Amino acid sequence: MKDKNVNRRDFIRLSATAGAGALLIPNTASAATVQPATRKTAESIPVRALGKTGLQIPILSMGVMRADNPNIVRAAYDAGITHFDTAHGYQNGRNEEMLGNFFKDKPRDSFTIATKGKFDYPLKDTFEKDFTALLELSLKRLQMDFVEIFYTHALDRTEHVTDKRIIDLLLKFKAEGKVKNIGFSTHASKPALIDAAIEAGIYDVILLSYNFKLNNLKEMEDAIARGVKAGIGFVAMKTMTGGAEDAEGKNRINGQACLKWAWKNENITMAIPGFTNFDLFDDCMAAVRNPQLTTKDREYLAMLCGKELLYCQQCGKCTDECAEHLPIPDLMRAYMYAYGYKNASLSKETLLSLNMADDACKKCEKCKVSCISGFNVPEKIASITPVRSIPDVFLT
Ligand code: SF4
Ligand code: SF4
């Protein structure tokens, strides 16, 4: 494991994000972009505009992906969180169903929903029919006529963003009123994806990985700023870099510091941490009540900058280097789900979608991969692939 001391460069890097103003952020972020939440029963959570969508959304929203307890959704809603992020594939559809059952008797203008749909690329002849059926099934599970945001899920190539067939279908969904805004989600930190979205000119929102560990932070923040200028709203995920402050997943990360760091960039409308229990929810609420990043927070995050952690940058460099062209970024994500999120079911689901041989690494005498995050890739692959064979009944 890499383990450097906190150094001045890391401290400055964390302090300098989003320009000099970041050092001076007030308690509730920028007065220009943040106004009090309007729901009367709710705690006052600052809200920000989401690009040109016309939506004003609390800076703390809920990534529902791993939550299976509607009481957590209720606690979030009652506290003034109004945006809930799910996907067609989460928990094999049960995640959307849970939200549908929870929101069926709530005023439709008291919350906003984002869901996502995945497609295979290159597109099949039946793409339009299949993807339309996917969205309709999502709406049926959600018991809604429309969603505020529909993302194409987990894109990592510019041709996914600019493909005419995808664009035409997304615009059709929007014209039919089934989706109010369209976007894509991406785990890959690639400024080129944002620039492709700007050029395509049809995207309202981008959901992306955004955290203090990004090794191309400056390039990403510049691209996000260009996107904001073009009217795109940005939503941050993976703000907690895998949820653990060590590569073994032993100690929980200080999520409050991570969230506060993300919010200090005013170009990020909201973060969608995936709180799955009341302790994590309380932590997120404590952060949003006092979102100012302190010197202590900065020192803590700077210390983490020198550690390996569980967060894979999803840069894809290793895929070309690997003798077997293994889907290493996906494997590293599966590793993070198991060791960081402690969610072996999600890890297994991710692994099974990869169609990999059991002994892929055994064919190599010496690994050719050199990871930019310092991961021992074959060791991580060896420790995560057995999760595929664990019977569901034993999984978290
Ligand atoms: S494993 Fe390393 S090289 Fe590969 S995508 Fe992740 S950070 Fe990049
Ligand atoms: S040891 Fe595994 S990760 Fe490394 S090059 Fe071989 S197949 Fe790829």
Image: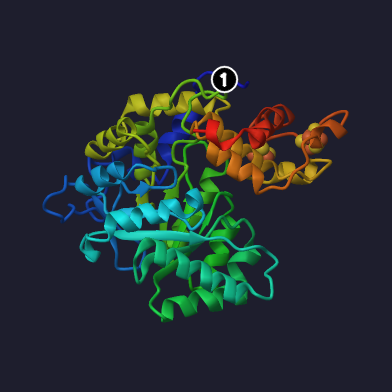
Position of residue 198 relative to residue 9, above or below, is below
Position of residue 320 relative to residue 360, above or below, is below
Q: Is mark 1 within 8 Å of ligand 1?
A: no
Residue found farthest to the left: 40
Q: Nearer the viewer, residue 146 or 396?
A: 396
In percent of width and height, residue 75 lies at: 24, 42
Quadrant position of ligand 2? top right
Q: Which residue is mark 1?
A: 4
**Image quadrant where one finds the N terminus:** top right
Neighbours of disc 1 within 10 Å: few (<14), some (14-19), many (20+) = few
* Residue at x 35%, y 44% (from the top left corner): 263
* Residue at x 24%, y 49% (from the top left corner): 77
Quadrant of res 382: top right
In percent of width and height, residue 310 lies at: 56, 31
Tag 1 secondary structure? loop
How many marks the image carries: the answer is 1
* Residue at x 44%, y 40% (from the top left corner): 239
- How is the structure coloured here? rainbow
In percent of width and height, residue 214 lies at: 54, 40
Is residue 119 among what the camera can see? yes
Quadrant of res 159: bottom right
Q: Amino acid at mark 1?
A: Lys
Q: Nearer the viewer, residue 389 or 327?
A: 389
Position of residue 30 relative to residue 337, above or below, is below
Q: Nearer the viewer, residue 197 or 130?
A: 130
Is residue 333 among what the camera can see? no
In percent of width and height, residue 72 lies at: 30, 41
